[in-house]
Image: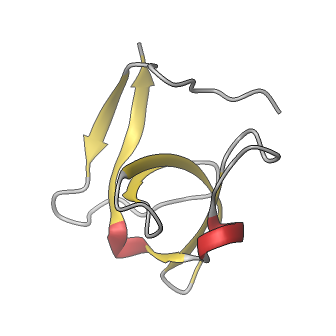
Amino acid sequence: MEPELNNGSLIIIRRNLFNIKKTAKDDMVIFINPLTGRPNVKRCSTAKDGMLFLTGDNLPESTDSRHFGSIPASEVRGWVWKKI
C-alpha cells in the first residue's frame, strides 16, 4: 500500500483533550512512539479492550506495533483530521 502521508506532509489534527472520541479501525492517530519518544502517525488496525494495534501504510518500511506492541488508547494525542 502506498503511504498516505510522506515526510513533510502537512496535516490538521483533532486533539484528544477530553478522551471523548474513541479510536476506530483505519483511524490515523498521533501518539508518542515508545521506542523513540517522538510523535508518530500510524493507522489503527485493531482496537480491543482499550489497546490499539497501529501499523504504517508502508508495511515493509514501517516501525509500528509489530515492533513495540499495542499501545493504550489513552496514549493517543489526536487524530488526523485532514491532509493539506
Q: How many marks?
A: 0
Name the one closer to the observer, 60 or 55.
60
In this picture, is 39 found above or below 18? above
Give left or right: position of 73 versus 7: left
Q: Is residue 55 visible?
A: yes
Identify the residue at image location x=35%, y=53%.
38
Image quadrant in which the C terminus is located: top left
Residue at the far front in the pictured view? 36
Identify the residue at image location x=64%, y=55%.
63
Name the one closer to the observer, 9 or 79.
9
Please provide percent x and percent y for residue 83: 45, 20
- Which corner quadrant of the image does residue 11 belong to? top left
Please provide percent x and percent y for residue 27: 55, 48
- Which corner quadrant of the image does residue 77 belong to? bottom left
Identify the residue at image location x=61%, y=77%.
69
Image quadrant in which the N terminus is located: top right
